[in-house]
Structure formats: C-alpha cells, structure tokens
Image (tube, rainbow, N blue to C red):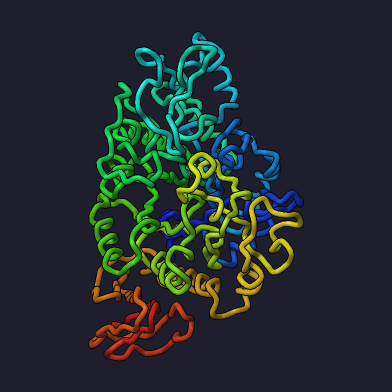
Amino acid sequence: MHENFAWWRFGILYQIYPRSFQDSNGDGVGDLRGVIERLPYLRELGVDALWLSPIFPSPMEDFGYDIADYTGIDPVFGSLNDFDALVVAAHDLGLKIVLDLVPNHTSDRHPWFIESRSSRANAKRDWYIWRDPKGEGGPPNNWLSEFGGSTWEFDADTGQYYYHAFLRSQPDLNWRNHDVRRAMHDVMRFWLRRGVDGFRVDVMWHLIKDDLLRDNPPNPDFISGQQPYQQLIPLYSADRPEVHEIVAEMRRVIDEFDDRVLIGEIYLPLDKLVTYYGRDLAGAHLPFNFALISTPWNARTIAKLVGDYEAALPAGAWPNWVLGNHDRQRIASRVGGDQARIAAMLLLTLRGTPTLYYGDEIGMPQVEIRPDQVRDPWEKNVPGLGVGRDGCRTPMQWDSTLYAGFSTAAPWLPLDRNFGADNVAIERHDTGSMLSLYRALIRLRSERPELALGTYKLVSIAEALLVFEREHQDQRSLVALNFGCVSAEFDAAGLHGQILLSTFMDRQGEAIPKRLALRASEGLVVGLLG
Ligand code: NOJ
C-alpha cells in the first residue's frame, strides 16, 4: 500500500529510553538484550521504528548524553554483539532502528577532550571551544548553561575556559573545525554500515555558536521562579545561520546509504523549526515538532497550532508530531486520563509521522520522585523548579510482579505506585484499555491510508470540539475530538459513514446520524462514504 513512500513518512516511531525498558541481567537497569526480548511486543503494538536514547560508553552523568566513545556500547547496556543481534532481530520483524547521535558535546572523559585539555598546543585543542578569560578575568561572555550556571568552565592548568551548553562534564565540540565534522561523519558511517536506519540528532539547533561569542541579550519576559537559563535570549549561542550547512553535510552522509532518516531534536518556534528541513529540503527529514508537548490543551489552541504548522511547512516537507519524550512531563499526567486518549487519537490521526514515547501507550504517568530518589543532574543543579526528568523515565510497567516485569532487582528509578493495575499484561486483555486504544489506532492508521498519508483539512471548531478531515485518493476520514468535560454535538447532515473508533472503544460500526453526539472527552474517527 505504501510502496511509494519512504518508511519514515508512513511509519510510526517509538522512543525507547534503554535504561528503563527491560533489564535482562538483573542489575536494575535496562539493556539491549532486554529490548530484544520485547521486540514481539513492539511488533504487536504495530510501530515501525525504534529510536534508542544513547547506548554508548558514558560516565552516565547525563545518562548517556555524555559520550566517552561514539563507536562502542556501554557495558551497562551490553556489547556490540548484542547491538548487532538487536539490529538483526528488529529487521527480521520489519522494525527499523534509529540511534541517538549526540554531536554537540562529548563527555569530559572522551579521549578527544582529555587530549584537548592537556595543553594549549595539543592538536585537538581546537576540537572544543576554548577562550581566554575576559578582561580582568572571568568568563568570556554571559552565556548560561541550560542546566544552570555559566556555560564556561575554567581550566586552571591551561588558563582558559571551555564552553559547555549543558553540564560542565559535557564540553561542546567546535563545529567550526572541519576535523570535528569529518570525525563525526565517520561515526555516522560506522553505525550506518552496521545497519542502523538513521539518527535522531541531539540538540541540533545548538551545534554552532556565534563566531564572535557576543553576549546574549536579557529576556524581558523572564519571570522570577523560571529556570535561570531563561534570563537571557539565546540569540548568539544557538540557532545560528551556519548550522544549516552542518545539517546539510550530515544529510549528505545519510544519503550515501539507502533509505535512512535524519531527525533533529529542535526546540524552536515553528517558523524557525521548519528552516531545519534545509534549503531544497536537503536538511533534516524530520525536524522534531514538539509543539504539542507544551501547547495549552484546548481545541482552539491546538487547531491554530496545527494550522500554523501546516502553513509554515516548506513545499514538499513532511510533517511530524511528538507527544512526549524523556525530557518532558508525561502526557497522561499533563492532560489527565480521558484527555490522554484524545491526545493519542490526535497524534495518530494528524498528518505527519508520529513519535510515541515508551509507556505512553499504557498511560504511564509522571511518577513522583522523592528528593532522595533524584537521579537527574538537571534537577540536582537547579532544585525545586520542577525541571526534574526522572518522573518520565521510570521503568516500563510490564506486569504486576514485584518489579513490574522490568527487572529481577530493584530498578534504578522507582516504579509508579499503581503499576500493579496499570501494566501491559493487564491492559492487553482489557478491550477498553489505553493499550487497546493505541493498538486500535495504529491498526486503523495502517488500514486507512488517508490517516497516514492524506491531506489535512480543518472542518470546524466549536467550543471544545475540534473536527478535521483526512483524505487520500478519494478515501476520507473525519476525526472529531471533544477536548471538553461536557458532551458536544457535530452537525453531520449530508455526511454518510460509520464510526471506526471511539476513544472509549465502544461505538465501532455505528452509522453516523445527522447530529453526531460525543460524550465528554470523547474522540471519534469516522469513515466517510461518497
Ligand atoms: C537533549 C536530550 O534530550 C537531553 O536528555 C540531554 O540532557 C541534553 N540534550 C543534553 O545532551
């Protein structure tokens, strides 16, 4: 059915946070063999590609986003043999594998940085961003780290500062240096040759900084209580024009291989986000669209957001949507149970590639983390502001046994206290569960090409009811989503068809009447005839 479309257009991505998916060796931390064990579940769920957060050797100060070796596997996750076995097993089941590429920074324990900091004359000195103290001393400019404090760390041995956009143990590479580019392209080729189907590029919009290192301007909208990073507008430290050349170069490496994908992690307003498709669409295939993660949850705002995004897309660019990830609050806790079902229906019926975050398909909540359980370095650096990310990284809830079927040992992060009731084993047999809804939505999406590939048209928006239509080669579906807590009606006079799916899983097959009634927080997909 989809032979003319690249897999990353009609497919569904599923993000695995490997520490928390499945532990196979009883150390309380997930691993690659664990992922292999759970591939049949993912096949059954119906997703098409797995994106694994970093699995490379790392001191784990930022849980793998601080890489000490780009071409190995951290022992906590297994070995290169395990990785190769995962690629083969996934491909055998028709699942693609996308890796996390973290090219903006390394760990301070990466041999490149160890060399670079060893002396000003070292050949790798320029692989990182080193600067003299400013004037009387002090950091070269006013830039702030996303994780709190200055971005500059003084190295007493060589008398210069190095730049780090995140932790001080995550020095930024200097992408103005062409040896750095070549080295990273070789890293990409290493994994592409091993069979990976693409990369999700970490903080793509951070890759290159102002050559003059100009001070960032103050943010006039800063409100006290926000995270300190927001005091300045990152005008000179991120989203610089030169970044597009770097992305285009990465894309050329991707294009040396057949059918691979380049995805970018980019937190920017829509008009800037879409520039990452690149001139002539020679940039990222999918600049991640995180707008749903932070938008106020109501019909009008979401309709406007979808319209704005559709309008902003360059001709020929393929859209995408994300509801959650390992850095943001879980959708089930953000919008609540029944609205999380609306969110699922929205994600899987909008035009564009959807990315699911592991556990959202069973409605996993943001788990409360006691202060003594905090592992996230960001929360440790700027406590009390609610930036902690541990709550969305807790172990996958597979069943009701002691450690939820995730491990035979106490997991590295606590389990949700309701895991005994909310887990895969129970939800699989409950025809009304969140898992059953996700499976039904994914199945519907694969059976009805208009839901995956069709055009998007806003039909109406009244109070809390959003209605849109998808159409592909004369096949049409109507999606009606009630964001409100009271029932709503839609004037369906002149339309013929039947309900394909309700978020409550109980109205399949109903013919649509002239006035289509939706219960509070109900979503419907309706197959239209004629
Ligand atoms: C973005 C990643 O998603 C996040 O988890 C990480 O902490 C930062 N990049 C730094 O690598």
Using residue 182 as the reference point, say whether residue 285 is left or right of it: left
Find residue 226 and report its horizontal and vertical position in percent. 38, 46
Residue 184 can be seen in this image: yes
Using residue 157 as the reference point, say whether residue 150 is left or right of it: left
76 w.r.t. 409: above or below: above
What residue occupies the far top of the structure in this picture?
Answer: 121
**Quadrant in which the C terminus is drawn:** bottom left
Residue 181 can be seen in this image: no
* Residue at image coords 33%, 62%: 296
**Quadrant in which the N terminus is drawn:** bottom left
* Residue at image coords 65%, 44%: 83
* Residue at image coords 49%, 56%: 13
Using residue 96 as the reference point, say whether residue 292 is left or right of it: left
Find residue 489 and report its horizontal and vertical position in percent. 29, 84
* Residue at image coords 52%, 15%: 156
Q: In this view of the protein, which residue sits in the foreground, 323 or 233?
A: 233
Find residue 341 and report its horizontal and vertical position in percent. 45, 72
